Amino acid sequence: QVRLVESGGGWVQAGGSLRLSCSASGGTFSSYAMGWFRQAPGKEREFVSAIRWRTGIIRYAESFKGRFTISRDSAKNTVYLQMNSLKPEDTAGYYCAATAVALIEDIPTTREEYNYWGQGTQVTVSS
């Protein structure tokens, strides 16, 4: 059973940084894509970024390019999301997700494509 546990959320002032972590267990992740999504109150869950375990291929939603950086540590089975220049509108629950992907170049970007989810970690950015 795949299990994802996020950590690293918290409160930060606008302009600050946070690094989120997602620890994965219970599976062999070499063929997986790992994604980060976020959901603000009253809004849909939106794609932030994703990375392929094996190749390290990365994709970002356009609005996060340049501020957020995804990375992985295969030895620790952990995926990170470094968030810089945070804005109050980045306030949301951030969720880690995982799914097995058949095509080596494919990186899912919709919530429906991901089969496993963490419980989320809250990020609050004050102005």
Image (cartoon, grey):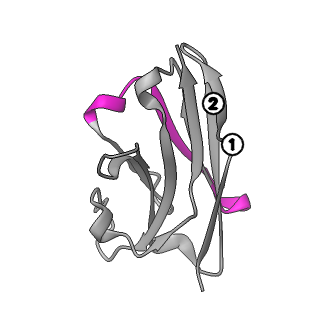
Q: Is residue 6 left or right of residue 117?
A: right
Q: Is residue 105 left or right of residue 90?
A: left
Residue 106, given in percent of the width and then of the height, sits at: 28, 62
Task: Name the quadrant containing residue 109.
Answer: bottom left
> Of 103 and 18, which appears nearest the observer?
18
For residue 112: magenta?
no
Question: Which residue lies at the image location 33% right of the left edge and 49% below the top edge?
Answer: 47
Q: Which residues are magenta?
A: 62-78
The residue beneath circle 2 is 18
Question: Which residue lies at the image location 63% right of the left edge and 30% below the top edge?
Answer: 18
Q: Is residue 33 left or right of residue 75?
A: left
The residue beneath circle 1 is 8
Question: Farthest residue in the right direction?
Answer: 76
Residue 66, given in percent of the width and then of the height, sits at: 40, 23
Question: Farthest residue in the bottom direction?
Answer: 1
For residue 73: magenta?
yes
